[in-house]
């Protein structure tokens, strides 16, 4: 005789002791009425009993109880060791800085500069000034004048205030100023 299909999962949970009290009461009521489910629950309980761990020993209970205290102690020791290393490193760096400050000028004065070469070094020949394009010439050059083929007279006319005023008037009187550009 097989156990009820709708009760198989509940029987396994009942044997493991994993049911809520209300569900456990319903399963017990069903087990009183159904012999097949009762046999299945006993078999499940027997199988799960083989896999059950023994209760922890006194030593295991003591270790578990002391775990928070030992963990905090280990963390505290690690923090103290790290702080000691940082203090040591800081003290060594400070000592090195003091040594460099004290001995730096002494070592610098003892270092000799290499002697200057005895043979004169020839300077490279410079091109004639007529062919060279100097910085001043470059600064005075107007790259747009070449591109627009404007003469000096045309440039002076463009720079006059009357021309700029007429251009501004045209620009602001135009209903669509973007078209004039």
Image (tube, rainbow, N blue to C red):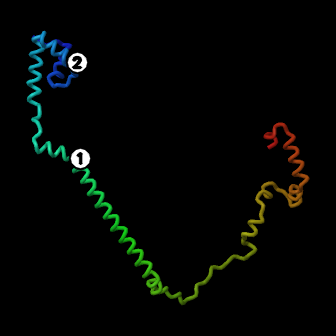
Residue at 26 percent across and 51 percent down: it is 72
Residue 8's place in the image compared with 107, above or below, is above
The tag on residue 26 is none
**From this viewpoint, is residue 133 visible?**
no
Badge 2 marks a residue whose secondary structure is helix
Residue at 12 percent across and 19 percent down: it is 41
Residue lying furthest bottom: 118
Residue at 31 percent across and 60 percent down: it is 82
For label 1, the crowd category at 10 Å Cα-Cα, with few meaning under 14, some 14 to 19 and many 20 or more, is few
**From this viewpoint, is residue 18 visible?**
yes
Residue 155: x and y, percent? 86, 58
For label 2, the crowd category at 10 Å Cα-Cα, with few meaning under 14, some 14 to 19 and many 20 or more, is few
Closest to the observer: 35 or 141? 35
Q: How many callouts does the rendering have?
A: 2
Residue for badge 1: 68
Which picture quadrant has residue 11?
Answer: top left
In the picture, the quarter occupied by the N terminus is top left
The answer to whether residue 150 is left or right of residue 45 is right
CB atoms of marks 1 and 2 within 8 Å: no
Badge 1 marks a residue whose secondary structure is helix
Residue 66's place in the image compared with 153, above or below, is above
Residue lying furthest right: 162
Closest to the observer: 156 or 162? 162
Between discs 1 and 2, the one toward the N terminus: 2
In the picture, the quarter occupied by the C terminus is top right
Residue 179: x and y, percent? 80, 39
Closest to the observer: 102 or 172? 102
In whole angstroms, how far apart are the C-alphas of marks 1 and 2? 36 Å
Residue for badge 2: 22
Which picture quadrant has residue 170?
Answer: top right
């Amino acid at each position: 005789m097989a156990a009820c299909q709708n009760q198989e999962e509940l029987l396994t949970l009942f044997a493991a002791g994993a049911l809520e009290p209300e569900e456990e009461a319903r399963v017990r009521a069903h087990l009183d009425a159904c012999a097949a489910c009762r046999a299945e629950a006993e078999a499940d309980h027997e199988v799960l009993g083989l896999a059950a761990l023994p209760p922890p020993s006194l030593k295991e209970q003591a270790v578990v109880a002391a775990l928070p205290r030992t963990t905090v102690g280990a963390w505290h020791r690690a923090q103290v060791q790290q702080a000691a290393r940082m203090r040591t490193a800081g003290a060594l760096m400070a000592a090195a800085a003091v040594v460099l400050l004290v001995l730096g000028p002494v070592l610098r004065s003892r270092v000799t500069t290499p002697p200057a070469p005895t043979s004169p070094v020839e300077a490279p020949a410079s091109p004639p000034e007529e062919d060279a394009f100097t910085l001043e010439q470059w600064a005075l050059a107007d790259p747009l004048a070449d591109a627009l083929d404007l003469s000096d007279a045309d440039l002076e006319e463009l720079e006059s205030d009357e021309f700029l005023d007429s251009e501004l008037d045209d620009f602001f009187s135009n209903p669509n100023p973007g078209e004039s550009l």
